[in-house]
Amino acid sequence: MGRVHERCCATGTGKLLFSLSQPKFYSFIFQVFLIFLLSLTTRANEALQFSSSELCCVHVSPFFMNKLLNRLQIAIGKRKTLGKFRTTTPPPTFPLLDFASNDYLGLSTSQEQLALVRSIYDRAISSSPPPPLLGSTGSRLITGTTKISLEVESYIASFHSTSSALLFNSGYAANLSIFSSIPCQHDNVFVDELCHNSILMGLKLGRVPESSIIKFTHNDMSDLQSKITRHGSPSGTNIIATESTFR
Ligand SMILES: Cc1ncc(COP(=O)(O)O)c(C=O)c1O
């Protein structure tokens, strides 16, 4: 950013000097030449920084870095004053009743579940050809789809009596993907006011205009009905977004 600013200042000076002494045409040609020269030297500089640094690829001037750090520190200070500053801490080790996590069925500590996961993992490792052991190696569309991921999806589909299923890394990622890709420009989406933030963020990323995202009172079917009657889309589809578990 620093360089862009310097470049603008330099061409500004060139413009001033040459419009005083040269005819307009030559002044213009010279300015173009000057900009070209400046961009060449800037690129050469950047290339040098690129090859001489091990980790840092982009040069940010200390002035802009300090400005950014100051801004972030002010924002953090504000969050702390409002009691909204969050940190990551491991869960306590002493026994507690869990009202906070998503582990509703207690599967994370189930010994039966652990034995089942181990046996499936062992079977997957010994199958031929062996799947990657530590990680998918790539996106699902390229190298990340393994036999076991297809088996899990087909099991989930049959469990829910649907034709197919698609696994995501998290509920948040699933909601971002679905709500940013399925609703189209002419659709209206009616969202329960207590729906998870991931649904709203997905809609924000997608093609539905903000005025077509309509919140209805939590679990209130008569409010939903009246909002659909009032705002229902004549040309698109009316989509209702809600959850099976609100928390
Ligand atoms: C209703 C609801 N939807 C989506 C999510 C996001 O899911 P995940 O934590 O798997 O990203 C949560 C997380 O708590 C949730 O409660």
Image (tube, grey):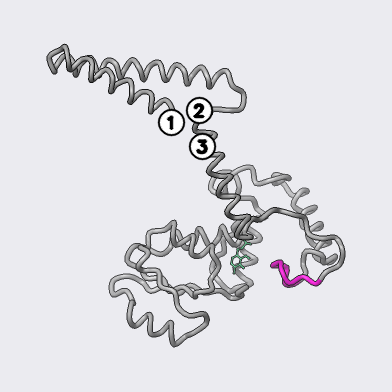
At 53% from the left and 43% from the top, the residue drawn is: 71
Q: Amino acid at mark 2?
A: Ser
Q: Amino acid at mark 3?
A: Lys
Does the Cβ of the disc 2 residue fall within 8 Å of ligand 1?
no
Label whose residue precedes the other's in the sequence (2 or 3): 2
Q: Which residue is mark 2?
A: 61
At 28% from the left and 71% from the top, the residue drawn is: 235
Residue 1 badge: 1
Q: Secondary structure at mark 1?
A: loop
Asked if residue 186 is among those painted magenta in the image, a careful observer would answer no
The image position of residue 127, as x and y in percent, is 74, 49
Q: Nearer the viewer, residue 38 or 208?
A: 38
Q: Quadrant of the C terminus?
A: bottom right
Label whose residue precedes the other's in the sequence (1 or 2): 1
Left or right relative to 32: residue 110:
right
Does the image show residue 25? yes
Ligand 1 lies in quarter = bottom right
The image position of residue 74, as x and y in percent, is 56, 47
At 18% from the left and 16% from the top, the residue drawn is: 27
The image position of residue 241, as x and y in percent, is 48, 72
Does the Cβ of the disc 1 residue fall within 8 Å of ligand 1?
no
The answer to whether 64 is drawn above or below residue 130 in the figure is: above
Q: Nearer the viewer, residue 25 or 112?
A: 25
User: Which quadrant holds residue 4?
Assistant: top left
Residue 67 badge: 3
Q: Which residues are magenta?
A: 97-105
The answer to whether 141 is drawn above or below residue 22 in the figure is: below
Q: Amino acid at mark 1?
A: Met
